[in-house]
Image: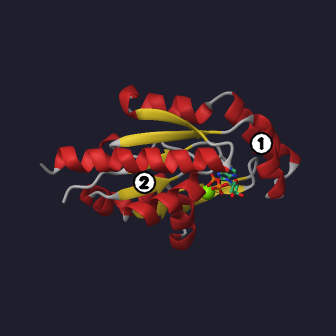
């Protein structure tokens, strides 16, 4: 059976992981967190002093995932999207969260002032939405509001319906 690949992207803290895991458990699709994958395989190629985090070795991440992505049925979670092959994804969801709500979530994570400010600006200037529309066909890029549990539930249901529809169309 043909299954779609879904990209969940957006600023850190918008709820990609929460949504991705819930979707995977309710759809049977496989969930891949690119940050965790990189950590496990040490897929890094340097350290970003300014942002105080290791730099992803994007080529190795792509190599690592390519076979699974070609098979289909994968939900990918990452706060970046311009280095994935365009052919991987059938749909891209950019999660969006209000500034005050996002601030609270990131503060709870213990982010320092600079990291807080950078991520809040990233959300205000819709950096990930623009990266997504620059990297994929606009008609497959959708924004999802992710401010509260009701929106989470509605996003899950909406994507489950999208999957069901995609599967029907591509397996008949
Ligand atoms: P990301 O993976 O995008 O960094 P997470 O899924 O880790 O974000 O979510 C960040 C925090 O926000 C977590 O504490 C999570 O429980 C909470 N959260 C995620 N989505 C929602 C939502 N729709 N409403 C309220 N809280 C949420
Ligand atoms: Mg996450």
Q: Is residue 17 left or right of residue 113?
A: left
Mark 2 crowdedness (10 Å alpha carbons): few <14, some 14-19, many ≥20: few
Q: Secondary structure at mark 2?
A: helix
* Ligand 1 within 8 Å, label 1 CB: yes
Residue carrying label 2: 59
Query: Where does residue 47 sit, x and y in percent of width and height?
Result: 67, 57
Identified at 21% across, 55% down, the residue is: 2
* Rendered image: mark on residue 101: 1
Rendered location of residue 17, percent (x, y): 58, 57
Q: Position of residue 20 (x, y in %)?
A: 51, 57
In the rendered image, which quarter contains the N terminus? bottom left
Label 1 – label 2 distance at C-alpha:
34 Å
Residue 85, located in which quarter of the rendered image?
Answer: top left
Q: Closer to the camera, 168 or 89?
A: 168
Q: Quadrant of residue 25?
A: bottom left
Q: Kindly state the secondary structure of the residue where label 1 is placed.
A: helix
Mark closer to the observer (1, 2)? 1
């Amino acid at each position: 059976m043909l299954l779609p690949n879904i990209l969940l992207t957006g600023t850190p803290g918008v709820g990609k992981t929460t949504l991705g895991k819930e979707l995977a458990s309710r759809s049977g699709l496989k969930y891949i967190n690119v940050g965790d994958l990189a950590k496990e395989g040490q897929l890094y190629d340097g350290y970003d002093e300014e942002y105080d985090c290791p730099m992803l070795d994007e080529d190795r991440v792509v190599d690592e995932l390519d076979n699974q992505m070609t098979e289909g049925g994968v939900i990918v979670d990452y706060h970046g999207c311009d280095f994935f092959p365009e052919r991987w994804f059938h749909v891209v969801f950019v999660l969006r969260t209000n500034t005050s709500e996002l601030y609270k979530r990131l503060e709870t994570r213990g982010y320092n002032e600079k990291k807080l400010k950078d991520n809040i600006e990233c959300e205000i200037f819709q950096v990930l939405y623009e990266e997504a529309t620059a990297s994929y066909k606009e008609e497959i890029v959708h924004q999802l509001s992710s401010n509260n549990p009701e929106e989470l539930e509605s996003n899950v249901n909406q994507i489950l319906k999208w999957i069901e529809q995609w599967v029907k169309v591509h397996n008949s």
